[in-house]
Amino acid sequence: MGVGAAAWAVQGGVWPREQAADQAPNRTEWRIADRAFTERVVRQCHIEYGAPRALSAPADGLLELLVADGAAVKKGDIIARYAIDTLESEERSLAADIESLRSRIAFKSGPYRTETEAIWQIERETQEGSRARIRAKLEEMERLEANGQIAPQRLEETRLRLEEADAEYARLSHQRTLDRAQMKLDIGQMEHDLTVAEARLEDIGREKDRSALAAPENGVVIWRDPQLAEAGGGELRRGTPIASLVTPGRYGAVVRFGDSDMGVIEGATVSVGFEDGRQPVRAEIVSKRLVDDPIEQKRGRYAYDVAIVFKGDETMLHSQALCSFSRPVATPSAAIPASALRFQSGRVYAMKLEDGKTGLVELELGEVADGYVRVLAGLKSGDIVVE
């Protein structure tokens, strides 16, 4: 039996009858004609807050809840915060280190370098003056020694003094080169340490920002775990769902459908009916999500969670309802009166009249509307059936 046949059978099998223009005794003939139909899928659904914004723990650690369950908050309000004593201690230490490094770099690359260069210049000029005097004295002693006026050993002593002065001047030149390289290396190391410290300080700032959980939009905070809310916080793992941010007056449900129903869901009109006799309310679809079920998907079966929202009042929260999804069939379809159907062994037939002869044809049926059933296969518009 088709879905439509089952539907009208459940409704009691009582349908209005429509008399044909020409009829023979004990027989009514019906001409199959096109009619408009609506596809409909109905599900039992549980009403919760509509389209809640899920909030999760941003990091591992001890999280303190700063607002009560059901508190109204504005976008940007801090609703929870991690313990940050250790971070703040490290932040203070790093700030002091950074200030010290900046002062040392400024000193090394400024006054220290200037004064050291000045000292080196004085030493160089002193060394050059001393060497010039010894060299002049040596020239004078060479002249005197050539005239036999001084002993040769005194000339040799002066030569040795000049060689020592030259060696000291060379040593001082190499020492200046080495000191400059060492100064450059020291400044480079301090600048590297400063960069690392500043980067870590920025990281701490970001960690502190992440430690504070802010409301992403206006709404009401509903904590997921009553025990956590009662305790005012606790140890949490990163990614743990902790709260929902909901909009007052907005309610909804999540309804699961298989592949076969999704053709109706796309673009459907949605209504939500309640058991207390109140008028059904219009709802809208806000999201469709494929259910992650690898086992069923390997079998070629897919399911989807469809979220709907609607405006309502607090009496609807946590109640049971019927969620109806309906969509008009794109084009009118062949329709047969329900009274012209025959059932046998779980199958549906109709008595077709053709060329003055009648015979049973098996039907595939669809939706029901105003006492008529949509014919998916077995008959077409213009065919005549006999009741």
Image (cartoon, helix red, strand yellow):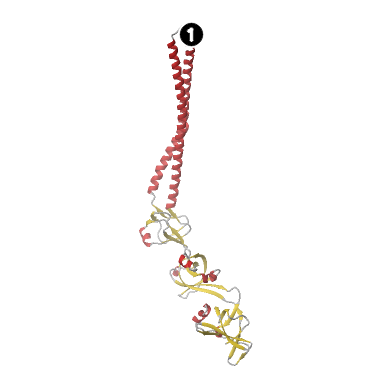
Q: Quadrant of residue 349?
A: bottom right
Disc 1: CA contacts within 10 A as few (<14), some (14-19) or many (>=20)? few
The image shows residue 204 at horizontal and vertical percentages of: 43, 47
Q: Tell me the residue at 58%/90% (across/down).
A: 27
Q: Quadrant of residue 58?
A: bottom left
The image shows residue 225 at horizontal and vertical percentages of: 39, 61
Q: Which corner quadrant holds the C terminus?
A: bottom right
In the displayed orientation, state which residue is furthest to the top: 148
- Asked if one can make out residue 183 in the rendered structure from this viewpoint, the answer is yes
Which residue in the protein does label 1 denote?
146
Camera-nearest residue between 167 and 115: 167
The image shows residue 329 at horizontal and vertical percentages of: 58, 74
Give above or below for 369 relative to 67. Answer: below
- Tally of marks: 1
Camera-nearest residue between 294 and 181: 294
The image shows residue 89 at horizontal and vertical percentages of: 38, 45
